[in-house]
Image (cartoon, rainbow, N blue to C red):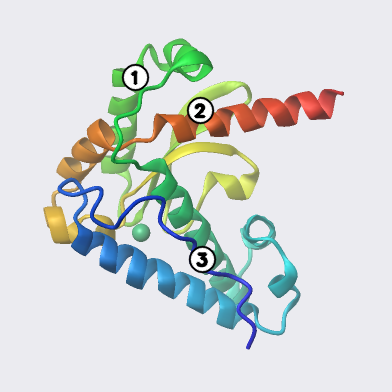
């Protein structure tokens, strides 16, 4: 069996987010859950046209699918979501600056207001899912999605995400999802990654206009 999809390396050491997210949580979340999505995806796409497709294209092509293709969507989206989540977090203190900071001020009033909206979205997501900062129609906004669903499937530019599946916080916070959200949003968000994602969109818009 070919294995076209690989588990991408973490952008930091597995204990780097401690104590907000412990090395034990990372060992299960990355080493077991994320790895399992990669392994299951490789099994599901074996011998299909999806084996030669980019991960993003698979997610977009299967977002409304049923049956086996729904399983492909769930696993492909979770591989993408988790890779995006790891890169949304950093142990280094970063701050929104430049054009990202201006866009946050314009659309939320400030970083504190944006963080409050992300916390609310993460708390309100019933069951498993994700809270997102996205850029859509020239405006930043906060969205929440259930299970493996991702704004990227609809072609929406994602800037940051926070995983609110129980496996993301149960070992460290038990059932206290709000405490996990408060700590992660306050201490670990990678604003430089968000700025890069916003800049990519501007380059794409300029390229399309030329
Ligand atoms: Fe997760």
Front residue of 169 and 74: 169
> Can see residue 145?
no
Quadrant of the picture in which ligand 1 is shown = bottom left
* Displayed quadrant of residue 178: top left
Residue carrying label 2: 195
- At mark 3, the secondary structure is helix
Q: Earlier in the sequence, mark 2 or mark 3?
A: 3
- At mark 1, the secondary structure is helix
Furthest-bottom residue in view? Answer: 1
Residue 129 at x, y percent in the picture: 37, 53
Residue 111 numbered tag? 1
Residue 1 numbered tag? none
Which residue is at a point 18% across and 49% down the rendered structure image?
18
| Mark toward the viewer: 2 or 3 | 2
- Alpha-carbon distance for marks 2 and 1? 13 Å
Q: Is residue 34 above or below residue 139?
A: below
Residue 208 at x, y percent in the picture: 82, 29
Left or right of 46 on screen, residue 116: left
- Alpha-carbon distance for marks 3 and 1? 32 Å
Front residue of 35 and 17: 17
Residue carrying label 3: 74
């Amino acid at each position: 069996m070919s294995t076209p999809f690989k588990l991408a390396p973490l952008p930091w050491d597995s204990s780097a987010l401690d104590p907000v997210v412990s090395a034990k949580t990372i060992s299960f979340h990355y080493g077991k859950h994320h790895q399992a999505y990669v392994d299951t995806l490789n099994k599901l796409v074996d011998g299909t046209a999806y084996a030669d497709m980019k991960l993003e294209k698979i997610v977009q092509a299967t977002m409304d699918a049923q049956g086996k293709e729904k399983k492909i969507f769930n696993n492909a989206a979770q591989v993408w979501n988790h890779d995006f989540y790891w890169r949304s977090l950093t142990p280094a203190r970063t701050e929104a600056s430049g054009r990202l900071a201006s866009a946050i001020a314009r659309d939320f009033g400030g970083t504190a207001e944006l963080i409050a909206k992300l916390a609310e979205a993460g708390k309100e997501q019933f069951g498993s899912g994700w809270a997102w900062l996205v850029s859509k129609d020239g405006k930043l906004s906060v969205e929440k999605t259930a299970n493996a669903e991702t704004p990227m499937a609809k072609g929406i530019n994602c800037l940051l995400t926070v995983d609110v599946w129980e496996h993301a916080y149960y070992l460290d916070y038990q059932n206290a999802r709000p405490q996990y959200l408060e700590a992660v949003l306050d201490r670990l968000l990678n604003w430089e990654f968000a700025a890069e994602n916003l800049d990519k969109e501007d380059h794409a818009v300029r390229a399309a206009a030329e």
